[in-house]
Image (cartoon, grey):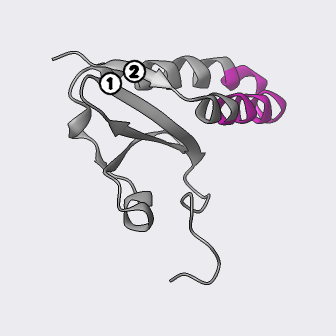
Amino acid sequence: MRYTVITTPEAEASITDAFVFLAVQAPRNAERWLRGLSTAIESLELFPGRCAMARESRQTGADLRQLIYKSHRIVFRIETEIVRVLYVRHVAQRPVGETDDET
């Protein structure tokens, strides 16, 4: 089965932010990173269930999965015929919904 991959506006915004940051820090690598990230996201069309559960699943109780691409986590949900990319976050960032008082 081939899934349709949809990227949410929040995920798109975080991709743009990461790209802008990389373009300042490592201009030669920014375009390559963006192309690679796009390829990783597109790969979710086939067998998205191969990916591990995301850390956010514990807080939300939702079946969220993640695909690691270099220093970023692509967090997504598998729906009937859709893979919905919810967030793209640096691996050093706290999971969405986690606060300082949680262990």
Which region is colored magenta?
A: 14-30
Q: Is there a contact, CB below 8 Å, between mark 1 and mark 2?
A: yes
- Graded by Cα atoms within 10 Å as few (under 14), some (14 to 19) or many (20 or more), the crowding at tag 1 reads some
Give the image quarter of residue 8. Answer: top right
- Pick the quarter of the image with the N terminus: top left
**Residue at (50%, 83%) from the top-left corner?**
103
Q: Nearer the viewer, residue 14 or 8?
A: 8
Identify residue type, mark 1: Ile
Residue named by callout 1: 82
Alpha carbon distance from label 1 to label 2: 6 Å
x%, y% of residue 32? 60, 19
Check if residue 16 falls in the magenta segment: yes
Q: Left of 2 or right of it: where is 76?
A: right
- Graded by Cα atoms within 10 Å as few (under 14), some (14 to 19) or many (20 or more), the crowding at tag 2 reads many
**Residue at (41%, 39%) from the top-left corner?**
76
**Residue at (65%, 78%) from the top-left corner?**
100
Main SS of the magenta segment?
A: helix
Residue named by callout 2: 5
Q: Nearer the viewer, residue 21 or 14?
A: 14
